[in-house]
Image: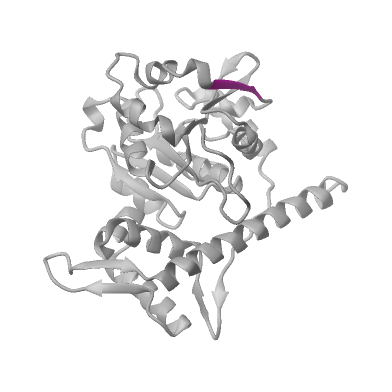
Amino acid sequence: MKENRTTSNPLRIGAVITAAGMSTRMGDFKQLMQIGGLSMAERVVINFQRAGVRDIVMVTGYRAEEVEKALSRRGVTFLRNADYAATEMFDSVKIGLSYLRDFCDRVFLCPVDIPFFREKTVEEEMRCDADVVIPVTEGHKGHPILIASSLIDDILAYQGDDGLRGALGEFRSVTSYLDVEDEGSLVDADTQEKYQQLVEIHNRHLLHPEAALKLSNADSFFDAGTVLLLKQVDRLGNVREACERIGISYSKGWNVIHTVEKGLGCRIVDRRAGGIDGGSASITERGRRLIRLYEELEQDINEFVKKRFAEIFSERDLF
C-alpha cells in the first residue's frame, strides 16, 4: 500500500460505477429510475462526490446515450462496454480500472443498483489503511469496495470463473472487512420490495449541504465542470474525445476552454492542428497549476461546510 500523502499532495481517489447491464426483474430502466427526485445513477455519483471522490467513471452499455445525457452535468467520465449484452459486470469493472489505474492511488467499485450507501461509509473506508476494504453490515459484505491501484494489473489479469469476487479472493491477506452501520450498502434494486427499502433509506439521509466553487472576475469562468473537461483533454490529448467522455458537445467544450482563457487572459490549452479529429491538444503548465489550486480550495471549502453543517444541524431540531 502506498504511503499517505501530505495535505498538499493527498491520495488520489477514484470510483468505477458499473451501469452497463439490463435489469431482468425490475419493470423499469434501473439506471435512470427516479427515487426522491434523483435517478439511481445520480445518487451513486452524489454519494461519492459528497465524500470528496472526484475522479468518477461510469461504465455504460444498455441505453448508454440516455444515461450519459442524463448525467452530463454530474461531473462523470463515461466509458462504454460495447459487449454489455454478452459480458458480465466484471468486464465493465475492468474497463473502468484500466482507465483509472494511472490516475488514482485507490479506486472504489460499485454497481449502479446499490445507490444508497452513506457518505460516512465511504469516508470510513478511505481512512482504513488496507489494500482492499470491504464494508460489512450485520455480517453481510456490501458496497462500495475500495482497492489500491497497485492491485489493478493483477485484477485485470484474473482469468477465473468467479468474476470480481474471485479476483479479490486472491488478496484476502491484505483485505480489511470494515464494520459499518449502513443498510444501504447492502440493498440493490432488482425487486419492487427492495425498491421500497431504498426509498425509506433515501428519505432518512436526504438532508446534506452542497457547496459549488466558481472562479470569477467580471463573470464566472471556471468551475468543477471545467476541471473535468481539462483533465480529459490532458489525458486523451484531444478535445473532441474529451467532450465525448464527459457527455458534452464538441462546440460546448471549446466554448468552455475559450471562456476560461478569456477570464484568465492566457492560454491554458495548447493546440496542434491537423487530422480528421482536429489535431491534438494538451494543458499548459499554468492550466495544470490552476486545476491543482482549484481542487485544493474546493476540498478545504467542502470540509469546512460539512463540519459546520454537522455542528449547526446536530444541535437544533429542524422539524
Which is more toward the observer, 64 or 2? 2
- Taking the magenta stretch, the answer to whether it contains residue 178 is yes
Q: Find residue 130 and report its image quarter.
A: top right
- Please indicate whether residue 95 sits to the left or right of residue 227 in the image: left
- Please indicate whether residue 112 sits to the left or right of residue 163 in the image: right
x and y, in percent, of residue 152 in the image: 38, 32
The rendered magenta stretch, by its main secondary structure, is classed as: strand
Is residue 13 depicted above or below 281 in this figure? above
Give me the residue at 44% from left, 85% from top: 265
In this rendering, the count of numbered labels is 0
Give me the residue at 36% from left, 55% from top: 246
Q: How is the image coloured?
A: one colour
Residue found at the far front of this picture: 3
Give me the residue at 35% from left, 26% from top: 154
Q: Do we see residue 112 in this rendering?
A: no
Q: Find residue 237 and report its image quarter.
A: bottom left
x and y, in percent, of residue 150 in the image: 42, 33
- Taking the magenta stretch, the answer to whether it contains residue 297 is no
x and y, in percent, of residue 20 in the image: 32, 35
x and y, in percent, of residue 11 in the image: 54, 46
Q: What are the residue bounds of the magenta stretch? A: 175-179
Is residue 74 depicted above or below 172 in this figure? below
- Please indicate whether residue 180 sits to the left or right of residue 291 in the image: right
Q: Do we see residue 199 in this rendering?
A: yes
